[in-house]
Image (cartoon, rainbow, N blue to C red):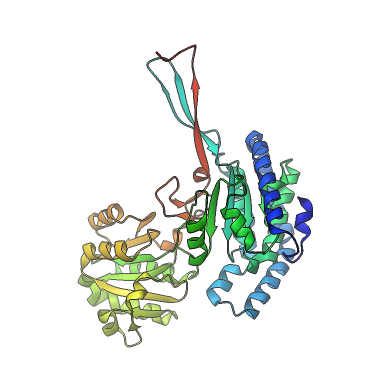
């Protein structure tokens, strides 16, 4: 498969043949990973981290090439932020690999052990999922995060980055495969699709002839919707991150200002960024105007309901569509609600079950919000930008899942495993 990586511009190969080859090679690599020791996997990860640091200049040069093309194409600023790499982000990538190497190996964990009355000893044991496909847009760092997580969990992974990050992803992928080679593991365990042809996505959605076990999409709504609609294998994904912060009647104003500002504007283009601010009418007289002014002064456009319009002349009228819009930009919708009941109802009606937060000093109200809001991540008095696998102590994440099957919330090492039952007997037969 090595010759496939020499396709410099992502074109010039038969996509179906390329993808079939990658699928077969990944499936073959799974067996080797099943037998690989924790030490070998960790050695590969640490070697890859060292190589990323050593080749930072090459990665930045490749990223500059991607950024120049994206700017020429008139790419939006939020998208450019997700695409851009700098020295700090490269170090964060490398540190993430080291952090994953330091985590306990999830494979082989005994999840349950019990003995039946007939003497059978039964264990439920964590096992790899198999071959995971990751389809992502813009964020080249996903190459490192996803590759490392899948490897540590004993899975082979097929990475299909977007054409906009093609050269950045290639340089990062080369560092990962060098780590695998140094540890004596098959380089096919972390494969990067070497063509930009969109037909490659269709091949992955079809399951690559039975060689793909799970797909994780990371990107915009149209990509995720397509994957969820067309995939013939299970999908871990969230469609949108319509994230709410509810400032309840007993919220501390200083705390609310700090949390809201960070939740909205720390990085506007991530899925944990707040998109809607709800303010309890019981504290709107003291809290609404300062919160709105703070956002406006920080360069954030505010779209509000009638009460919010009255609080500041710079607010524009919110449309009905605003309440269900993921802006991924310096824009926020603001609404005044009649207490906790209406706040929960609003989140349930317009939210995407991703991440939602309540700001309050009332413990009873907080506990009710945490219990009744049916989102993958529910927070009390903390920025929604903590909705990230690294911040949860998972080392990194392969994505956020909002479904209720298998994985929910940040998909880290444990979520990238399944399980099997091991049954030990002593000649028992079933009557």
Q: Position of residue 236 (x, y in %)?
A: 49, 52
Relative placement, left or right, of 420 versus 431 is right
- Viewer-proximal residue, 175 or 159? 159
Please report the residue visible at 64 percent of the width from the left and 61 percent of the height from the top: 90
- Viewer-proximal residue, 47 or 18? 18
Please report the residue visible at 28 percent of the width from the left and 52 percent of the height from the top: 371
Relative placement, left or right, of 280 versus 395 is left
- Is residue 92 in view? no
Q: Position of residue 146 (x, y in %)?
A: 59, 53
User: Which image quadrant: the C terminus?
Assistant: top left
**Residue that extends furthest to the top in the rendered view of this protein:** 427
Tell me where residue 261 sits by quadrant.
bottom left
Please report the residue visible at 63 percent of the width from the left and 37 percent of the height from the top: 38
Q: Position of residue 325 (x, y in %)?
A: 40, 71
Vertical comparison of 38 with 81: above or below:
above
- Is residue 27 in view? yes
Relative placement, left or right, of 166 versus 301 is right
Please report the residue visible at 39 percent of the width from the left and 19 percent of the height from the top: 116
**Residue that extends furthest to the bottom in the rendered view of this protein:** 313
Q: Position of residue 429 (x, y in %)?
A: 45, 13
Number of marks: 0
Vertical comparison of 224 with 300: above or below:
above
């Amino acid at each position: 498969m090595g010759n496939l990586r020499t396709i410099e511009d992502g074109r010039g190969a038969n996509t179906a043949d390329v993808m079939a080859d990658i699928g077969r090679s990944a499936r073959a690599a799974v067996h080797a990973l099943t037998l690989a020791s924790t030490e070998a996997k960790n050695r590969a990860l640490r070697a890859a981290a060292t190589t990323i640091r050593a080749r930072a200049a090459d990665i930045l040069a490749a990223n500059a090439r991607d950024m120049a093309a994206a700017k020429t194409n008139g790419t939006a600023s939020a998208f450019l932020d997700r695409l851009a790499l700098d020295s700090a982000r490269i170090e964060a990538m490398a540190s993430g690999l080291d952090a994953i190497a330091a985590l306990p190996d999830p494979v082989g964990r005994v999840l349950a052990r019990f003995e039946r009355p007939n003497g059978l000893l039964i264990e439920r044991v964590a096992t790899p999922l198999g071959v995971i496909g990751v389809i992502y847009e813009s964020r080249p760092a996903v190459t490192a995060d996803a590759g490392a997580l899948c490897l540590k969990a004993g899975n082979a992974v097929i990475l299909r980055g977007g054409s906009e990050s093609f050269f950045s992803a290639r340089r990062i992928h080369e560092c990962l495969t060098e780590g695998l080679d140094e540890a004596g593991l098959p380089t096919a365990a972390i494969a990067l699709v070497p063509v930009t042809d969109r037909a490659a996505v269709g091949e992955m959605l079809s399951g690559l002839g039975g060689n793909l076990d799970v797909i994780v999409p990371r990107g915009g709504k149209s990509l995720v919707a397509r994957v969820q609609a067309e995939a013939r294998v299970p999908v871990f994904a969230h469609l949108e991150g319509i994230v709410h912060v509810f400032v309840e009647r007993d919220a501390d104003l200083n705390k609310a200002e700090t949390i809201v500002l960070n939740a909205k504007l720390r990085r506007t283009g991530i899925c944990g960024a707040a998109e809607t601010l709800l303010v309890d009418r019981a504290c709107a007289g003291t809290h609404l105007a300062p919160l709105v002014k703070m956002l406006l002064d920080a360069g954030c456009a505010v779209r509000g309901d009638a009460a919010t319009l009255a609080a500041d002349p710079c607010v524009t009228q919110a449309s009905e569509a605003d309440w269900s819009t993921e802006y991924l930009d310096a824009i926020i919708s603001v609404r005044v609600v009649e207490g906790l009941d209406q706040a929960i109802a609003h989140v349930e009606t317009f939210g995407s079950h991703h991440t939602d937060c309540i700001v309050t000093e009332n413990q009873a109200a907080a506990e009710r919000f945490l219990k009744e809001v049916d989102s993958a991540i529910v927070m009390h008095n903390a920025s929604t930008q903590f909705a990230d696998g690294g911040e949860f102590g998972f080392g990194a994440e392969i994505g956020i899942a909002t479904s209720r099957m298998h994985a929910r919330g940040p998909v880290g090492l444990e979520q990238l495993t399944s399980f099997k039952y091991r049954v030990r007997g002593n000649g028992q037969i079933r009557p």
